[in-house]
Image (cartoon, helix red, strand yellow):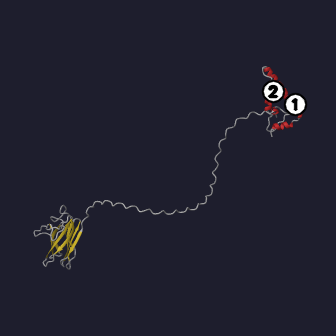
Amino acid sequence: MNPESRTARLLGPPGRGRFKKAGVVASLALVMASGAAGPATPATRSASDRTTGAADGGDRCRPHQDEVRVLPGGPADGRWGCRGPRGPRGATGATGATGATGLQGQPGVQGQPGVTGVTGATGATGTQGEIGVTGPTGPTGPCIGIDADQASEDFEIRVALTGGRTYAGIRDQRTGEKENFLWTDLSGRPDYPAGGAAGLPCDVSVNAHNRSTTVKRIKFDVVTTTGQIWEAACVAFTTTHPATLNCADRTGRPKPWILVAMQPTPGAVNGGV
């Protein structure tokens, strides 16, 4: 409750009268003081003061009691003055601290799996591409060959081609022999085909003739990469143990390779070149 309101209710009619008289005396004094200070002050000023006093609350701005009663929260002399003008709005207070994050909600119920879509139709087979160009022919691989002959009960013959070289072999078959092959390299003999027009040896064969004499003549042949046929002759000796091959002439010189007379030719019938 406003202390002014409480004070006004405590005063009776006599008290209010005394306050009014005091207010009249104070107003007259102010008018006289104004007249003394400036004779040009219009007489309507006192009326304006009264109007302003009435607008400010009338009797609220003037004392209403003779006895001074000090109320809790009121002025020390128990007299209330006029209400002053409203003060400016105070500055906005600082933003308060952000509150703590709330608890995480419960996970929602998992949705149902979607329906699997229908498999699309298989597309048509594309047109087959054209055959690519044939690549170049690779280099000729190494020629390897072997042949065998046994024209006598005393020994057997082998001829082998490997690594570009031709080897002649003999193995004794008589009782008591170790039956090991004995090899002779025929590649170092004169006129061995080693390239060029003759070509390189690419396959081999052997021919042994069974004669009653102790000298057994044997022929070894090679066919080259150019289609030529070359031949070397040797003799098998059975007078020694084990049997051996001798590919030299009577003077001890190695027998040369000989280009076979009449080479095969396309379309030939009992002929050649």
Q: Position of residue 164 (x, y in %)?
A: 22, 65
Q: Residue at x 86, y 37 (%)?
A: 10
User: Which image quarter is the C terminus in?
Assistant: bottom left
Residue of label 2: 47
Q: Position of residue 31 (x, y in %)?
A: 81, 24
Q: Residue furthest toward the left?
A: 251
Foreground of the two, 206 or 261: 261
The local crowd at label 1, few if under 14, some if 14 to 19, many if 20 or more residues have their Cα within 10 Å, is: some
Image quadrant in which you'd find residue 263: bottom left
Q: Say whether residue 216 is left or right of residue 71.
A: left
Q: Say whether residue 146 is left or right of residue 117.
A: left
Q: Residue at x 81, y 27 (%)?
A: 47
Badge 1 element: helix
Q: Position of residue 66 (x, y in %)?
A: 86, 32
Q: Amino acid at mark 2?
A: Ala
Residue of label 1: 18
